[in-house]
Amino acid sequence: MICIGIESSAHTIGVGVADGAKVLANERSTYKPKYTGIHPRKAADFLSKEFEPVLERAIEKSNVELGEIELIAFTMGPGLGACLKIGLVGAKMLSQVLGTPILGVNHALAHIEIARTLCGCRNPLVVYVSGGNTQIIVPEGKKYRVMGETLDIGLGNLIDSIGRSMGLKHAHGSVIEELAKKGNYFPLPYSVKGMDLVFTGLLTDAQNSLKTHSKEDVCYSLQETAFSMLAEATERALALTKRRELILCGGVAQNTRLQEMLRQMAKPHGCRLSVTEGQFNADNGAMIAVTANLMYKAGVRTKLSECRAVQKLRVDEAEIRW
Ligand code: MG
């Protein structure tokens, strides 16, 4: 069925149109604050301003008539409350105007399901890495089980924070990745607790090292340390679950050094790493539309009166009926 998916959990307003697993359009606009992190109200103002043009572009690119749309979906959470509400209100309005059912989608679940669908994996081990999240996840019965995760900040937040400490105008992971290519290694704190990870000590030490080391060296050493920690914890989960498929998803999945490390780690276990295109790993509307299609087909329904924004929502709270 043809579904419009709206994503607005943080700094991106995304509108995707999907017919089942087939993505017809995936448009987005991202708030990029200079020198600072995301201010929730400013981000929400940006998303509300950009919602209409992004929606228009998505519908135009999809070549779908309004009357053909059968389902409206939105990101229910987790995310910033003020931002989530922009998508929620937009979705409610659209479903009322078009007379379609509406579905609230778990954002983390959507990152996994679009990657799983597009990579053609059935029973993978999943590494989900974004600004706020770093989790090692495995499907188990009707739920996803989190085997290991960050105990403090997400991997993306770690990378963005060091970028801001360096005074970068736009502290994006891709900038850090480029700087790291020219750097040399020096030791930084390495904290793996079983299958869980801790990043704040590493961040503090990396920030202090900016006084004595070049930006390039700090970026390289930070990436090598954090990614090795994640690879070690993931290898433990892989040895335990014996999966043959490993998916890397979420915004930080676009980092090619992280991909390379996980690929190398997985190979001796007879396990293949899959990563989907960048546009589907960044926050986007298509992942909401594709996941909503899976949910609707499996019989999940949301009443209009039950639609709400949930700031704190974990991936292991979602039921997987497909
Ligand atoms: Mg995300």
Image (cartoon, rainbow, N blue to C red):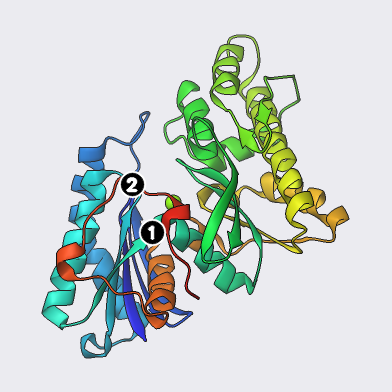
- Closer-to-camera residue (200/15): 200
Residue at position x 74%, y 39% in the image: 232
Residue that carries the numbered disc 2 in the rendered image? 79
Residue at position x 67%, y 30% in the image: 192
Residue that carries the numbered disc 1 in the rendered image? 106
Image position, residue 145 (x, y; %): 56, 53
Amino acid on which the number 1 mark rests in the picture: Asn
How would you rate the neighbour count of disc 2 (Cα within 10 Å): few for under 14, some for 14-19, many for 20 or more?
many
* Above or below, comparing residue 77 to residue 26 in the picture: above
Distance between the alpha carbons at the discs numbered 1 and 2: 10 Å
Residue 307 relative to residue 251: left or right: left
Residue at position x 50%, y 46% in the image: 130
For numbered disc 2, what is the local secondary structure? loop
Please say whether residue 103 is visible from this viewpoint: yes
Amino acid on which the number 2 mark rests in the picture: Gly
Image position, residue 240 (x, y; %): 76, 51
Label 1 residue near ligand 1, CB within 8 Å: no
Image position, residue 290 (x, y; %): 43, 73
Residue 225 relative to residue 282: left or right: right
Image position, residue 77 (x, y; %): 33, 52
Disc number for residue 313: none
Residue at position x 20%, y 71% in the image: 303
How would you rate the neighbour count of disc 1 (Cα within 10 Å): few for under 14, some for 14-19, many for 20 or more?
many
Based on the displayed image, in which of its 4 quarters is residue 301 positioned? bottom left
Please say whether residue 279 is visible from this viewpoint: no
Residue 184 relative to residue 119: left or right: right
Are discs 1 and 2 less than 8 Å apart at CB? Answer: no
